[in-house]
Amino acid sequence: MKIRSQQDFWAGLVFVAAGALFAIGASGFEVGDSRQPGGAYFPLLLGFVMMVLGAVINFKAVTFETDDGAPVAPTDWRAMLAIFAAMLLAAVVLPVIGLWLTIPSMAALLAIGARRIKLRSWLGVSLLAGVLCWLVFVQLLGLPLALWPRQTG
């Protein structure tokens, strides 16, 4: 078997692995049915779809020729670390400093990972992401998220 597209091959393997992890994680819950889905219904369905998609991508990677073999680009570790740090920051500080200060903090960490971002872009992303998060999570879903820092005293 000759891999004709390295990028597609590795992407397909990541999809298959992620889908398998979703399916394994869902195995401890009840599946239910379409009328009354259980806790495993959506993760199991998502895992199955991801595995099928990964298999299709892998089939394409070994079947169809690409111009340059689509080599895998080097990993931008700085960007990956910034993404991980932003998610960790959100998990830790959201309950303490609130949504309106967490979102700009996350955007600042992501800007560090992006390397080339202007202040105006950072402000725009922060404002848009904050408003969308407030709209979806607080207004539409009704989650009790703190919007501002806690008052102590």
Image (cartoon, helix red, strand yellow):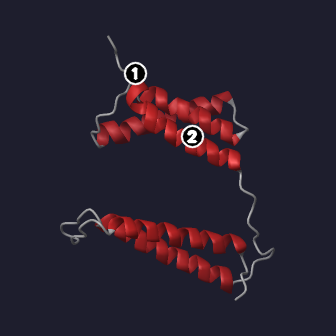
Q: Residue at x 76, y 69 (%)?
A: 71
Camera-side mark, 1 or 2: 2
Quadrant of the frame with the C terminus: top left
| Image x and y of residue 117, in percent | 69, 36
Count of labels shown?
Answer: 2
Decide if residue 127 is in sight here.
no
Left or right of 93 in this view: 146: left
Q: What is the quadrant of residue 5 in the picture?
A: bottom right
Mark 1 or mark 2, earlier in chain: 2
Left or right of 69 in this view: 14: left
Q: Which residue is drawn at 56% across and 45% down?
A: 84
Q: What is the quadrant of residue 145 in the picture?
A: top left
Q: Residue at x 66, y 46 (%)?
A: 79
Left or right of 122 in this view: 45: left
Q: Which residue is drawn at 51% across and 42% down?
A: 87
Q: What residue type is labelled 2?
A: Ala
As drawn, the residue found furthest toward the right would be: 68
| Image x and y of residue 141, in percent | 29, 43
Which residue is under mark 2?
A: 85
Residue placed most toward the observer, 67 or 9? 9
10 Å neighbourhood of mark 2: few (<14), some, or many (≥20)? some
Tag 1 near tag 2, CB within 8 Å:
no
- Above or below, 132 against 80 in this view is above
Which residue is under mark 1?
A: 149
As drawn, the residue found furthest toward the top would be: 153
